[in-house]
Amino acid sequence: MVWVLKRVGVAVLLVAIVVSIVCLAIRLVPGDPATLLLSQGGVAPDPAAVAQLRHQLGLDQPLLVQYLASLRGILHGDLGQSLQDGSSVAGQILQRLPRTLELIGVAAVLALATGLPSGLAAGLRPGGLFDRAAGLAAALGQAVPVFVVGTGLVLIFAQTLRWLPAGGYVSFAEDPVRNMELVAMPAVTIAFGLFSVVFRMTRASVLDIARRDFVRAARAKGLARRHLLLRHVLRNALVPVVTVVALNLGTLLGGTVLVEYVFNYPGLSGMLVQAVDARDYPEVQGIVLVISVLFVSLNLAVELIYAALDPRVRRA
Amino acid sequence: MRTLRLGPVVGVAAIALVAVAVPVLPLSNPTAMDIMHRLAPPSAAHWLGQDGYGRDVLSRLLWGARSSLGVAVAAAGLACVIGTGLGLIGGYLGRGAEFLTMRSMDIVLCFPPLVLALLVITLLGPGTATLIPLLALVYLPGFVRVAYAGVLSVRNQNYVEAMRVLGAGRARIMLRTILPNIGGPILVQFSLAIAAAILLESGLSFLGLGVVPPAPSWGGMIAAARATMAQAPLLLLWPCLALSGTVLLFNALCDAVRDAVDPQRVPRRRGAARVLDALAPGLVAAGGPVLDLCGLTIEIDTPAGTVCPVRDVSLQVHSGEILAVVGESGSGKSLSGLALMGLLPPAARVAAGAAWIEGQEVLRLDEAALRRIRGRRVAMIFQDPHHSLDPVHRIGAQVAEAIRAHRPVSARAARSQAVELLRQVGISDPERRAAAFPHELSGGMLQRVMIAIGIANGPRLLIADEVTTALDVTIQAQVIALLADLRRARGMGLLLITHNLALVSEVADRIAVMYAGEIVEQGSAAALLARPLHPYTQALLRSAPGEDGSLPEAIQGTVPSPQARPAGCAFAPRCTYRRPDCETAPPPLVDAGGEHLTRCIRWYEVAASVRSAETVA
Amino acid sequence: MSPLLVAEGLGRDFAARGWFTRPRPVRAVADVSLSVARGEAIGLVGESGSGKSTLGRLLLGMLAPTSGRVLVDGQDLARLLPSDLRRLRRRMQLVFQDPYSSLDPRRRVGAQIGDGIAIHRLVPAAEREARVAALLAMVGLEAAHGARYPHEFSGGQRQRIGIARALATGPDLLVADEPVSALDVSVQAQVLRLLADLRARLGLGLLFISHDLAVVRSLCDRVMVLYLGRVMEEGPAAEVLRAPHHPYTRALLSAVPSLDPQHRRQRILLAGEPPSPADPPSGCVFRTRCPWVLPACATAVPPLRPVGDGHRSACIRSDIGEAGPLVAQRLHDNTTRQHEQERAE
């Protein structure tokens, strides 16, 4: 129990540091950030606009005052207003976050459903035909960038075969079939890369576990093969796989940027790119904050799962 | 360390060469537009055609390679140098330095890479000058962690402590001793980081936030080609191929480096195992020994050819008897035990011989039939109890599992039987221990658990492979006493495999001494210890410290490796009784009377020397 | 002759670090005093967890003691500047248990043997090679072996290389931490004989750490028996092994299997396992496993008291040496006799 409290404590501390860094990052930029944000193509911005932006961002106030004001806002769920249209950043994030989570969720299910069994099969017979075939697929999934895979899928399934829509979004509640059609291609695109991770990790882990002494000792008991594979080999092999998969899911929170862009999918990451393009600092700040906090929470969840899977960790 | 596979190295070198040579190659200007010939197909002047602005695609592709690789290598290099330095300092100096470096990396890791990149680009604007330090920051934690983990594992190695004992300073130890030993993983991380940096850079350029157009980059080319992909799909193909191919090559290089650095090699599976010749029926009489092993020969395929670590081993164990097989590492004693269980490692196979356990031949059984025998008729206990139990399951469950593998009992009944077994092997408070995980028990306790698992189904033969080697002296005595008691109470045959002649001399009924894969002497324990008939046994007995406190006598030389087996007697090069004819042909195992076997052609001289020593005393 | 090394009341705690839990010190070594003279061999005997390796590191100044002090030629190691301590290291060297991890796998063994010479600038660089060759010859290897890598050698040869590296600085004291326990039986004797030979030839002080009393007796003048970080008994090796006064020494001695049927001892099977050093028993730390335990054993830590010439034991009873054990049995005789009876029936 002490161990859990300790991990939670560290996570809370990390969130606090992340919040501080994001709030203060704008002050760390050399030169006047307001001028920089308004500069477009080397044209000097209007001084009045700069002054107004400085006021809006709180740059005209002392560092501490601005920092405390931002913290107070965050604690009340207020992430400021967009520079583009003055809308609430928090509101927009709440609208878009579930879409990105849906995408990641579907991709994760696909990747685990394919990666785990193929990793187990390949790890049990290393060097076999299946191992080499699946290994090649995984190498491609690791090397080909998502925007290339995505563009390829659009070219084939949307433009040539016309089986699936090229992009867009409809919520599941509105039209489940259309929602699935629209989610399919971006999810497969992400799942391809994630499959490589799951496959390679599972394979390596199974290979490692299968040659441990305790597996030989378990075989010496005369256990049935299925029992041996599930209860001893896979059960132990899962420990590192879960960790790596979860960390990769965390990376995906921001990593869907390219996929959302390719499929014109209005998720959180698409909003981030748009905000970066428009140099809408409050929006960028809000999104980075939300993603990072989710990321830290996910890491915390990983550590707790890890402890649940491996009794040795709990002792520490 | 194995040699590096050449393919990926050559591929990466070729790409790097192109990237370096681009400025001197006769290419057209990558940014020169030619709107008249936009989307022109390949021609003699433009081998890969022209893009949406009529620019030469080949030229842009190669210049793109230069910028992509340049950014990636510079960023990965920067991250590598700084990260390795921080990891070394954090790992070796510990305390404050460790806390500072590792926690600051935790903070960087709170931001997913692409999100961190976008945050920085918002503030600093796009461009190569931003990209390199940015990517370096993104990949910094990876290097710090790899270096740190490497230092932690190397730091406790004795050779680092040896340098400290010698009086070496910190800088010398870090640079001369630790750095070379963690170089492998760092090299792997370096090629990994380059591949990842190429991907991230192209992704940012694809979004228009990396290398700023019109400067050529692969990501930017793909983004531009998407607009015209219906008319000119080839324009999309070239940068996609270049990008994916490069990353693929770097990943392959990474795997090659990893394989070359990692000493742990995946054993290659053999095809079909060689089928042993069928046996004539009726060879074994009913009511014979529990184990009757005849002419066991084991082969192992190594890169240097097939070696024979066990040759022509024959043994019998009767019920209620303890047969000790004594030998040093490499004598083949453990492989012989594993062969009886059908648990030989993948590279090894039984090449000849037969083994009857309670009259059933086991070397020719398939896996399903072997499974029914393992743990029921014959059980085996291994050397290291800490690694012989599955770390994630409770003790009781692992004992119960052995019961249920062979008997149709309910989970609850198996559990209570498991507790009873734990009690029988002398574990105090067995109910509580049954609920414990392996890491919560001491080595002696774990070995008792392994014994409980071994006897769970009342096997007729128990194979104990170096079961006391990993334990303390006082615990060793306990475990050996327990095994001797169990064998007596249950009338099992016990095959005790060990290197410690003294340990078994007090409990064994008969002893077989193995050297370099062969039995060199076998006989009753009393006779063999009192009158050894093989020079090796004699030398082993003398190599223990004497009761009078005299220094033990050394056996010169070392055990021959299986690859370099002498032509004649395997022990001849180290033997004091050696004669020329010892080295010409392998000596046979001869019976010196009273079922005392020896593989020495001069056993009578050996016997005479023992007798004369006794008369002198 | 003044002793080379003196340890007074040496103790070492390892703190179990925790953020929220109260740190509980683990006492690895408590109140150990000893002295080593030039050319003297002392055996430190104990099982795992007895603190014998920690004690070795404390004596070398590799670990700082929590209490007590180590004097080398009258200089307190704890008061030396780090640079002076490094210079002093030249005189005290260590031979490790595991011949595989004690050599750097990526450097030639000649270079590793030469490290000590280079660090302390003992001979000009030009003569270093000749010095390394001489060291290799001293441990029974050839000069050409110096150009090879560690993986090309067998365990016994690696242990010789480790000894050559330790001798390179010309030490006065060699601490050997279980130097033969990882070796094959037929090679152990070679290394033991080498150590005995070098000690006689070079007049080395030797601190021999081992779990094997028989080996210690054959090599050492004096022996110190440790249990859970405390000294149980110390004295001349022959004397302690012939007439052990402490119950633990007796039990340990009886557990060593013997090849000679005429020397079979009464086996004293100790019940249970050593307690955790983090939570040692009160009073005498051995009392939980001691067949001779008395109620008084739990009240106070028994002091080391003289029981013979230079022979001291930390047991409050004085009848252990003579009286027969209360629960010990002639295990071997009993089991074989019963077994034979069963067979006869």
Image (cartoon, coloured by chain):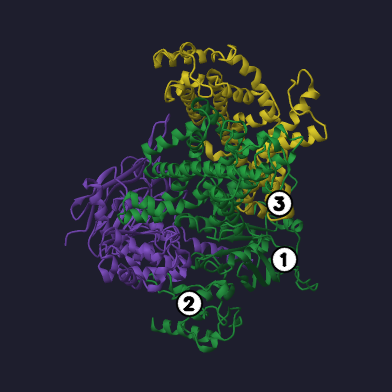
Chain colours: A yellow, B green, C purple
Secondary structure beneath dot 2 equals helix
Label pair 1/3, CB-CB below 8 angstroms: no
Give the secondary structure at mark 1: loop
> At which x and y percent is residue A118?
72, 45
Task: Identify the residue under disc 3.
Answer: A131
Above or below for C88 versus C11 = below
Percent of width and height locating residue B252: 61, 51
Q: Which numbered tag is attached to residue B538?
A: 2
| Badges 2 and 1, same chain | yes
What type is the residue that disc 3 sits on? Asp
Q: Amino acid at mark 2?
A: Gln
- The extreme bottom residue here reads B580
Q: Percent x, y for residue C17?
A: 40, 36
> Position of B549 compared to B135: left or right?
left
Asked whether, in this view, residue C135 is left or right of residue B540, the answer is left
Q: Nearer the viewer, mark 1 or mark 3?
A: 3
Judging by the rendered image, the residue that carries numbered circle 1 is B363
Host chain of mark 1: B
Q: Residue lying furthest front in this view?
A: B36
Instruction: Confirm whether residue B302 shows in the render.
Output: yes
Earlier in the chain: of badge 2 and badge 1, it is 1
